Image (spheres, rainbow, N blue to C red):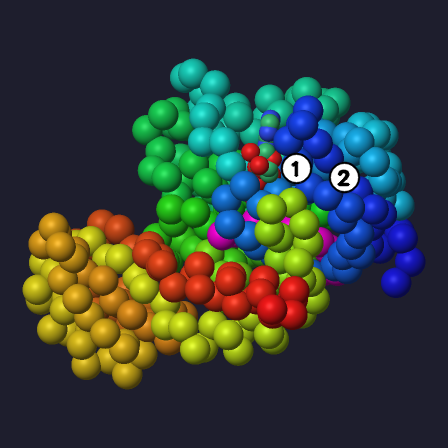
Amino acid sequence: MNAAGTIVFNDVSKFYGEILGVNRVSLSIPPGITSLVGPNGSGKTTLMNLITGLLWPNDGSISVLGVSPRDAESLFRLVGYATQIDAFPRGARGRDFVVSYLRVHGYANDEAQRRADAALARLGLTEAGSRRIAGYSKGMRQRVKLAQAMAHDPRVLVLDEPLNGLDPLVRAEIIALLREWVDQGRHVIVSSHILHEVDLISDQVVLLNEGYVVAEGDIRGVRSEMRRHPLQVLIRCRQPGMLAARIFELDTVVEVKLHVDGGGLLVATRDPDRFYLSLNRIAVDHDLGLETVCPADDDVDAVYRYLIGGEEGS
Ligand code: ADP
């Protein structure tokens, strides 16, 4: 594929003073959903900031569909970025948050309003757009950031931990939206430190460790490794005992334990997708008041060690 259709890193290094951000990264990222995966501090955000022109490399060169990230104006048209930062201007309303971003980047008021409304509708925030973000749930805050990143219809979407803290229904909606986005030949780059999530959504994976790319490519290797390590899910709800009885029977569930604080369950599953679907159904049917559903996984470290160790041949 030619440079006009790919994101290319050519021997790129970024240091923060003495501290290594990423080192000698060479990558060629085709369209589709690409996940940057690695433990905290491995360089995911640094790579995203380099793609989006917020940082410049100390060495090497980057091309985003043929454009240099130093060409800020061209890059803005190509790229949308939702950072991990969960802070918003004081008193901001969802719609203004999206409109003002478009205005800063040169859209006339009418066009900015029209685009903001379309993006908010796409993310299911039409009604919420007129309310203050301060009153939004975590899922709505994630979605309004996504609306802002998508509103100018960029060809590359860069999303730092976009599924973090979302309940399973919203996760599924956002994954479907990203899939639809790349089905039109575009790029989505997401970061995640949750390997099971990556398994679910990615076409390609770039595995990072301590600033180095340790593996890259399609995700078959990651996927087969995933199946050997059941995912631990922490579920908090009003009636953990009742929920335990219901989900114990599911064939997707390997183990169910009451959390030590008595307020939730730890469930091990080898098929998180099907498990989440069943969980939603049970929660609605029995009015169990689901509060939190999130991966709670120590085993992921073991998978990393395996993947990283395998790459080094140890
Ligand atoms: P990740 O997103 O995978 O958690 P980062 O890209 O944020 O990783 O960080 C990679 C490395 O760069 C870490 O060692 C981190 O401490 C360091 N780093 C990131 N940003 C800065 C900064 N602004 N100043 C100094 N060090 C930084």
Q: Position of residue 1 (x, y in %)?
A: 88, 63
The amino acid type of the residue labelled 1 equals Gly
The location of residue 84, given as percent across then percent down, is 51, 37
Residue displayed at 32% across by 29% down = 135
Q: Is 26 in front, or is 8?
A: 26
- Position of residue 271 measured from the top left corner of the image (x, y, whole percent): 39, 75
What's the mark number on residue 223? none
First to last magenta residue range = 184-193
Tell me where residue 177 appears, x and y as whole percent. Answer: 55, 56
| Pointer 1 or 2: first along the chain | 2
- Which residue occupies the foreground of this view, 247 or 255? 255
Whether label 1 lies within 8 Å of ligand 1 gets the answer yes
Please tell me whether mark 1 sits on a helix, a strand or a loop.
strand
**Left or right relative to 97: residue 284:** left
Horizontal arrangement in the rendering, residue 35 relative to residue 143 (left or right): right
Q: Crowding at label 1, few (<14), some or many (≥20) Cα neighbours within 10 Å?
A: many
Tell me the residue that label 2 is attached to.
13
**Of residues 176 and 34, the one drawn nearer to the viewer in this rendering:** 34
Left or right relative to 111: residue 42? left
Q: Residue farthest to the front?
A: 314
Residue 296 figure quarter: bottom left
* Residue 142 is inside the magenta segment: no
Which residue corresponds to mark 1? 21
Q: Residue at x 79, y 42 (%)?
A: 12
